[in-house]
Image: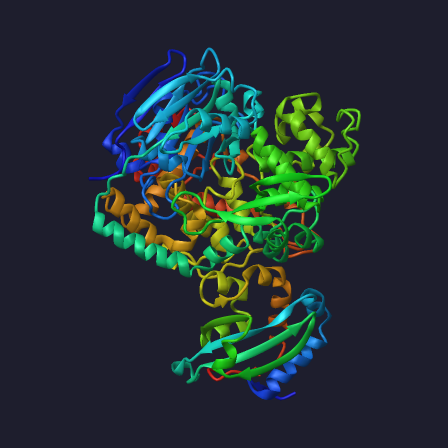
Amino acid sequence: MSSIFSRFVEIDLVDKRVTDFKVSPDYIRDYIGGASLAARLYLDIADPGVDPLSADNPLFVMCGPMGGTNFPGSSRFVMCAKSPLTGIWGESSSGGSLGAYLKKAGIDGLVIRGKAVAPCYLFIDDGKIDILDAADLWGLETYSAIDHLREIHAGEKKVSVASIGPAGENGVKFASVCNDKAHHVGRTGMGAVMGQKNMKALVVRGSGKVPLADEAGYKQARKNTLETAKESMITMSFNQVGTAAAMEMGMMTGDVPIKNWSVGLDDTIPEAIGGSVMVETIVKKRKACFACPIACKPEVVIESQKYVMDRGPGPEYETCGTFGSMLMNLDLAGLSKANERCNQLGMDTISCGATIAFIMEAYEKGLLTQEKLDGLDLSWGNIDATIELLDNIAYRRGFGDKAAEGSADLAANLGNGADEFLVTVKGLELPMHDPRGFHGMGLAYMMSTRGACHLQHSCQAVEQGMVAWDDAGLEEDYEGPSSDGKAEMVFITENIGQMANTLCTCHFVHWAIGMENLIDGFNAVTGLGYNLDAFMKAGARAWVLKRSIGNLMGITAEDDRLPARVLTPLEDGGSEGTIPDMSLLKREYYQLRGLNENGIPSAELLDSLDLGFLKERLQAV
Amino acid sequence: MAQLDVFSEEWCKLWKDMLNENAVFAKYNKGWEGDLAGVVQADPDNNFPEEQYLYLHFHDGSAIDVKMITKEEAQKCKFIMTGPYMRWYQVAKGDLDAVKAMMQGKLKLKGNLPYVVKYVKGVQESIKTMQGIDTNFPNE
């Protein structure tokens, strides 16, 4: 018996109706689960032209097929909808336990439709689903809401809670969903979509056992996988130093963005806010997601004079970038507090911090004044003013109301050359990896189906040399600041990375265990019998499907480009004097992927991936 | 200067001297304390018949000692980096980045990783310095 696809549920918040629905076996074979299956279902039920912040924008909460098993790193979940920040396909996944509990409750996916007349939350207690009143929860910050819901639903088996904060309630375009405090559905504004639906939280208790297609095969696959993970330097690095190790490593290679992407090197930054100093000063413990052998999540305590933080989730590398190097802030305590406030208010630390870096540069250039910023002095490095701004954004107070729209909207409204230092692709702020240091990452940003992203593919791991997957057709060693051979690398790593998001597996665990272990585990759980070719083809299908949805939402070849700032060579650092050859990369990539000159999948490509049904719809674009 | 055999006494001494003349190494190694053993596994097919043990002792930006040691001595070092001869050769020739080699499991590190991460630039610079030696490798 296979574990996958036993139950999909549509939840109509208008009528408070909960209805099971069937998913075609063809869909399961071709799209498997997670974001890929959500994208396919989206095309069946939604109008791509829908206003993202309207009741008609369905929100998907999806598991992967291996969720709830104890296969390493397999229990993430993903939320998908049209993004209010970018206006295109949005998806964002989270670790923790919620994905596992959902699956153990016997549920593979939820489609949440409509808008509740009053604040509500979903409570899934094993198979039973209730839509409950959230009047008392509305207005609470995420940590408080999570504590409250844990108390209400305390039982023999604990619940996992995902909640929005004030930012989601107030439609902040980069609002996140906070999952058990330490995990976040961060990117593309899924918190705002939840908020628009008057849905405060999702509470899940799951105590069932997930069935396996091949119990003996599973046992062996898991054993092999754990042995591989144990030996992996990725496991050791993420466990001992955390993701913030990328600050030290990246400063050397030109990966770390500094001062809104305008500076190439500053050795004081890793000394102040890098992974090793975090270990030495604030990290008290590492915590793990469900069934994870790595345990990379930092639990920190801050006891500075200015900022005090009880033991709780600490900043990851991305946040050390957005609230550290990007703002020229070397105060680790302030950075950690900004991270905590974003978590509590329910905001993506990448888009939020990057937007503030943009604001700081606009302020420096005189496009914004202290008066316009409600008296805040947003000079470089001013973390105190930054922290004050966070509440203004979440509650849409004063200038915070404008910042809540994201940096692309701010730049459009400011004019006067502000777009020269706006750093987004398709409206999504770049994560903290400089494409000048790693040209493949630049192409991956350009082509990502949700806007600039480092986790819609496995490019980072391959191009930075953390993994070498020759079985997938990749070379052993890529030179970072070079565009040669990168189109093919991105093409392959996109197909791989899409599968991590389809299976809802952790990218870090995937990097540590490699392709063979993952496919063996997948087959043992599902019985689908995929080989590497089928796996890669399913990844390609997922990418093309989401790209097509993007096309239906208005994306064309014009949108596949990097912003001017990261096409300006830096004067020092690991990426000194080099920029991605955008024209070469795009030309080679389009050819490899099979996109026409307008950036739309060709009919041949669609047919080859069993996506022929899209031909007619794409012809109208 | 004549070519020096890799891991010979002269080769080790020259590497140590070059490190102590390298201001960049001194800058990025400042604060480091501890010794590191490089375990170079045998590879008879490449004319490297026996496992050898390289010893590096750095202290606060200076190279205190670079020499070959015994297996027993290597096992007492604060950090131990192990790999096949050809991987070390690739690193020495600049064909393989040492950090990438560790991440990919081509060289295995035993020891406090956060400490190594903190001084990663110093580690890189020490290898870069060694690449400046005109070296005779047994497989060439």
Residue B12, percent from left and from top: 60, 83
Q: Is residue A573 visible?
A: yes
- Position of A368 with respect to A191 (left or right) is right
Q: Residue furthest front?
A: A156
- Position of A488 with respect to A3 (left or right) is right
Q: Residue at x 47, y 68 (%)?
A: B107
Above-or-below relation of A482 to A414: below
- Position of B90 with respect to A324 (left or right) is left
Residue A432, percent from left and from top: 59, 45
Q: Where on the picture, by quarter, is residue B63?
A: bottom right
Q: Where does the N terminus of chain B fall, quadrant-wise?
A: bottom right
Above-or-below relation of A549 to A71: above
Above-or-below relation of A591 to A478: above
- Position of B39 with respect to A379 (left or right) is left
A321 vs A433, nearest the viewer? A321
Q: Is residue A423 visible?
A: no
Q: Residue furthest left?
A: A1
What colouring method underlies this structural image? rainbow
Above-or-below relation of A66 to A249: above
Residue B124, percent from left and from top: 61, 66
A319 vs A361, nearest the viewer? A319
Q: Where on the picture, by quarter, is residue A615?
A: top left
Q: Where on the picture, by quarter, is residue A42?
A: top left
Count of marks placed on residues: 0
Residue A539, percent from left and from top: 36, 43
Q: Residue at x 58, y 25 (%)?
A: A167
A188 vs A539, nearest the viewer? A188
